[in-house]
Amino acid sequence: MTALAQAVAVADTSAATSTVVSATLASPPTPGNLLIAVTLMVNATTTVHPWGVPPHIAAVNTTVARESIYSKVAVPGEPSTISVTFASSATTYRLAVYEVAPTAGLAWLGFDGSGSAADAGVAAATLSSGTTPPTSTPDGIAVAAWGMNGAPGAFVSITNGFTATPMQSGWTAHKILTGTGPQESTLTWTGARRVGAAIATFKQGVPVSSAGFLALL
């Protein structure tokens, strides 16, 4: 069954001291596992993306809360430290990294779908992640993020089977998928803040061997 291969690595910068933030997994990623990076930032944009790839989704709530979700499949020699560079700003940035093992006999095929949401222009203490299109395969993972313009207070609840991981100005969350359908989660916390959210799903399938690929030609 699909599973987190190791604990989620979370890191942040100190206010106004650096535009680079790096998160380090406890051990080097296993080749074939899926790596997912989530960034939260306030009043800033990303200038150097994790792994040099653009985000699958970059949700924007005016300029006060932005979330981006990236992914890649780990290769041999994959480093355990992942870094992202942000535009200069007098605020802090957060980065969370997941490593996810596939179900036995399956391989990660990558990004499946995404959704996003934002507050109604005023501070809020609950927000949906947005809803993805129906997933195209039964095995996979969904990752969501809520970014806020400051410390949000205490966690209250999260819906639809997601597991939340705290960050300094919000939360990231994940859910192992075992069936198809749209994905969504609603987070509730104690201190109202301006907030935006994003969610992305990732899919698996039967790997095509090189011999099998050649047989198709």
Image (cartoon, rainbow, N blue to C red):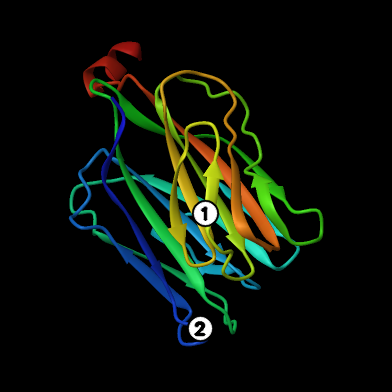
Give percent across and percent down for residue 194: 71, 63
* Disc 2 target residue: 15
Give percent across and percent down for residue 102: 29, 30
Along the viewing direction, whichever of 202 and 77 lies nearer the viewer: 202
Residue closest to the far right = 121
Could you tell me how far apart the alpha carbons at marks 2 and 1 are, in whole angstroms? 23 Å
* Disc 1 target residue: 155
**Residue 132 visible, this angle:** yes
Give percent across and percent down for residue 204: 38, 26
Residue at 58% x, 54% y: name it.
146
Q: Earlier in the sequence, mark 2 or mark 1?
A: 2
- Badge 1 marks a residue whose secondary structure is strand
Residue at 24% x, 59% y: name it.
80
Give the quarter of the image for residue 159.
top right
Give percent across and percent down for residue 54: 52, 54
Instruction: Give yes or no for contact between labels 2 and 1 (Cβ–Cβ under 8 Å).
Output: no
Residue closest to the far bottom = 17
Q: How many marks?
A: 2
Along the viewing direction, whichever of 115 and 31 lies nearer the viewer: 115
Determine whether 185 is above or below 210 in the image: below
- Badge 2 marks a residue whose secondary structure is loop
Q: Is residue 143 left or right of residue 207?
A: right
Q: Which mark is residue 211?
A: none
Q: Is residue 182 left or right of residue 15?
A: right
Residue type, numbered disc 2 = Ala
Q: Quadrant of the N terminus?
A: top left
Determine whether 13 is above or below 171 in the image: below
Residue type, numbered disc 1 = Phe
Residue at 28% x, 50% y: name it.
7
Give the quarter of the image for residue 205.
top left
